[in-house]
Amino acid sequence: MGVSVRVIPCLDVSAGRVVKGVNFLNLVDQGDPVELAARYYADGADELTFLDVSATVEGRDTMYEVVSRTAEQVFIPLTVGGGVRTVEDVSRLLDAGADKVSVNSAAVARPELLSEISRRYGNQVLVLSLDVKRSARTASGFVVTSHGGSVETELDGLEWAQLGVELGAGELLVNSIDADGTREGFDCDLISLVRGRVSVPVIASGGAGRVEHFAPAILAGADAVLAASIFHSGEVSIREVKDELRRNGMVVRTA
């Protein structure tokens, strides 16, 4: 039996509420994060990811209280990102109940943060989140963005993925800004190119709109698939995604 494919609901949180938009814009309220997390746990989610989408832009800390309340009710791995700038922030999140911490903009600004976190806590707790968009400005055709997709950096998407792993990231969350919220499917070309550069697990994010979109992302090289709006709306359930992955010959955990 092969390694199980993970299905991960993502809860983008702003001001204590779950939100979702298109290409990171026009955010719409989707509900209470703790209630949604409990629903996804009951539905068979393998992990949960909380991303505080406004913490970095607003220059504030992330949502420790929400993390703590969720950890009391949900007993699957919980990854938290947004506003994580220091090793001390990681310590506080782990103390609040997070299992892994996702770092994005702070690592772009100061890459050595990845090494500092990995040395203290091990790479198993460190997820490097990459918000990537297509661009003719870089050799690979992909450029890294920061601050919730609002700032375009000078970093080549594939080079940054590879460097991030070398610096200590134990997992990559690869989110396509172009596909995010469009519901037209994952950017499988991006996933495949990242897979060719790194050996750590890759989580595909951005673009899921139908149950049929998930298997191609795994076939492109992802170890896990992450989605938000289609789960929040109830249009597609985690169980339905797992059934579809099984039909495509993939191993998934039973709820």
Image (cartoon, helix red, strand yellow):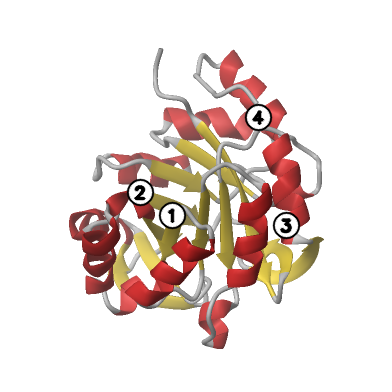
Q: What x and y, as percent, mark residue 38?
A: 73, 47
- Residue name at image x 43 percent, y 54 percent: 100
The answer to whether residue 159 is above or below residue 86 is above
- Helix, strand or loop status at disc 4: helix
Q: Earlier in the sequence, mark 2 or mark 1?
A: 1
Q: Are marks 3 and 2 in contact (CB under 8 Å)?
A: no
Quadrant position of the N terminus in the picture: top left
Q: Earlier in the sequence, mark 3 or mark 4?
A: 3
The answer to whether residue 113 is above or below residue 18 is below
Please tell me whether mark 1 or mark 4 is closer to you in this view.
Answer: 1
Separation (CA) of disc 4 from disc 2: 22 Å
The answer to whether residue 237 is above or below residue 119 is above
Is residue 71 rendered to the left or right of residue 18?
Answer: left
- Helix, strand or loop status at disc 3: helix
Q: Are marks 1 and 4 in contact (CB under 8 Å)?
A: no
Separation (CA) of disc 3 from disc 4: 22 Å
Separation (CA) of disc 1 from disc 4: 24 Å
Q: What x and y, as percent, mark residue 121?
A: 29, 59
Q: Which residue is mark 1?
A: 100
Q: Earlier in the sequence, mark 4 or mark 2?
A: 2
Q: Which residue is mark 2?
A: 171
The numbered dot on residue 34 is 3
